[in-house]
Amino acid sequence: MFKKWDIILIALLICLSFLPELFIGSKQTEQYSTTYAEITLDGRLYKTVPLSAHHGTTRFTINTTQGSNVVEIKDAAIGIIDADCPDQICINMGFIAKPGQTVVCLPHKLMIEVKTDKNSNNDDIIPAF
């Protein structure tokens, strides 16, 4: 049977098991003051778009030899809303706003990645969805 100290020890271990969630969870819900999107074509930087300071809706078209994509910025989020690629996966990825998130159009060799100036070592952090 369980003794009094066994129950106390089990309760203490259960409480301690939630400590990592408190630290990791607070990191993932952290608000970033300055976010921006880097748009790359064929591995080269095409354009940098500030997201945290953006208000309203802006659209622009990116034309390549493989085809074209229409990129839309809505407030602090960015996404591809139209593309002439056959699979349309980049459109289905939706809008992104958190650092580390990406939208990729493989047929057009286009990638949009959200980054932040807050911490240059954020490359190892996988955001919670």
Image (cartoon, rainbow, N blue to C red):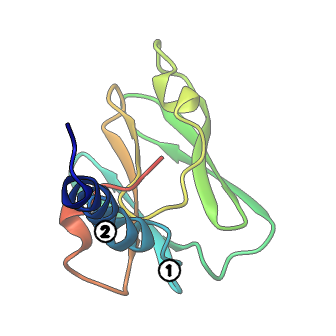
- The percent coordinates of residue 15 (x first, y second) are 34, 63
Name which residue lies at 57% across and 30% down.
91
Q: What is the quadrant of the N terminus in the image?
A: top left
Secondary element at tag 2: helix
Name which residue lies at 53% across and 86% down.
33
Tell me: residue 58, above or below residue 82. Answer: below
Secondary element at tag 1: loop
Tell me: residue 93, above or below residue 27. Answer: above
Tell which of 54 and 61 is nearer to you.
Answer: 54
Amino acid type, mark 1: Tyr
Amino acid type, mark 2: Leu
Tell me: residue 73, above or below residue 102. Answer: below
Q: Quick check: 32 left or right of 70?
A: left
Residue 77 visible in the picture: yes
Looking at the image, the residue that sits furthest to the right is: 56
- The percent coordinates of residue 24 (x first, y second) are 33, 67
Quarter assignment of residue 28: bottom left
Looking at the image, the residue that sits furthest to the top is: 86
Tell which of 52 and 81 is nearer to you.
Answer: 52
Name which residue lies at 52% across and 20% down.
88
Tell which of 41 and 90 is nearer to you.
Answer: 90
- The percent coordinates of residue 97 (x first, y second) are 55, 60
Disc 1 target residue: 32
Residue 48 visible in the picture: no
Disc 2 target residue: 19
**Lower sequence index among marks 2 and 1:** 2
